Image (cartoon, grey):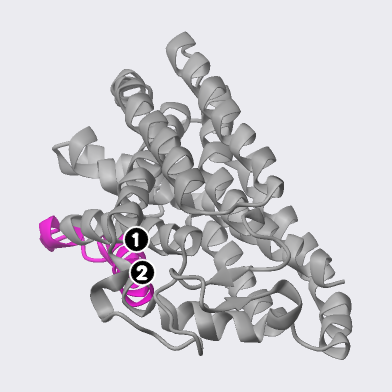
Amino acid sequence: MVILWWCVLGFLISGYFALAGYDYGVGMLLGRLSRDEEGRRRVLGAFGPFFLANEVWLVAAVGVLFGAFPHLEGKVFSGAYLPVVALLLGLVTFTAAVQLRSRRPDAGRGAWTLAITVGAWVTAVSWGVFLGNLVLGLPLDAEGHPAGGVLAVFDPYALVWGAGFVALFALQGAAFLAVRAPADFTARANRIAKALLAPALAFLVVAVVWGAVETTASWTVLPAIVLAFGAWGAASVAVRAGRHKAALIATMVLSASPVLAVGTLRLPDALVSSVDGGFSLSLTEAATNTEMLGLLTLVLPPALVVIAAVQWVTWRRHGDRVDRRSLLHF
């Protein structure tokens, strides 16, 4: 049952990255794609119907983390305190700025636009740094307490992951806008997506090679690595061929694949470890008791069905491009 709940957690986090990744990508590209207010509103309107539904996946994942793996969240959050705080600040800034930007038609919106862009960048970099630290190991001592100072989490490998997630989310955002944004944005979005293919591939290669040299990864991580390179290949072909919907699906899988890689990296013996290997936490040690897992088994499946159903209905009803007649949520 512990393995099952680990898979559920991985499914939720992967779903969050696959869906919310294009939100942050659009936020990072907002100023690049349009210089005028009408264009920016239409760009934001592209993800308007999906925005809050995408964030629900993270809320559900956090609930599973706290309920099913309470010992894990304590060690992980304390070992990567600064990236987690930066991540929360980025999320709050991005979410609030998106929703508040157009509340007053007569108000200036430059500061809100800047907050959207900065919040998206901070969120992407923070996610990358956070996951990069999970690959090489957290700065923890033998007792599992933070060590090395607050800046220890910003080692070169983690920064590579931070830059890589900027490339992945921006690529996903460009692919999304090629599908949902007004037709006059399609060519621009596709050009940006083509330009971002090389940085995304560079991140995958560096992260895998460097990680293989520095860690003793389990063979269970290989499917996630194959999936990542396969998704990049599919995205490259689709972007160059102008198959925008196929490119979006491929980039969604590409953004989710690093989460799958981190989640399967050291299963099941050393789920979380310190940089020097002096501390480790297995999957069984991280999990809650059997009674709590049983309770979660009764409660969560209906919630997952509702989340998936709402997402499907939202896409079914808002799959067309934004045009001048579309209702703009933001």
Q: State the residue position of label 2.
A: 87
Number of numbered discs on residues: 2
Above or below residue 104? Residue 125 is above
The picture quadrant where one finds residue 108 is bottom left
What span is colored magenta in the figure? 84-112
Above or below residue 311? Residue 277 is below
Decide if residue 87 is on the left or right side of residue 234.
left
**Residue 24, can we see it?**
yes
Label 1 to label 2: alpha-carbon separation: 5 Å
Above or below residue 129? Residue 164 is above
Q: Which mark is residue 123?
A: 1
Residue that appears at 58% across and 23% down = 246
In what quadrant of the picture does the C terminus appear? bottom left
Above or below residue 7? Residue 19 is above
Say whether residue 9 is magenta.
no
Secondary element at tag 1: helix
Nearest the eye: 222 or 126 = 222
Percent coordinates x, y for residue 62 in the rendering: 59, 75
Say whether residue 111 is magenta.
yes
Please state which amino acid type lies under the numbered disc 1: Thr
Residue that appears at 53% across and 86% down = 74
Secondary element at tag 2: helix
For the residue carrying disc 2, how many other residues have a C-alpha within 10 Å: few (<14), some (14-19), or many (20+)? many
The picture quadrant where one finds residue 5 is bottom right
Tell me if label 1 and label 2 are in contact, CB under 8 Å. Answer: yes
Please state which amino acid type lies under the numbered disc 2: Leu
Percent coordinates x, y for residue 33 in the rendering: 23, 34
Tell me which secondary structure the magenta stretch mostly adopts.
helix
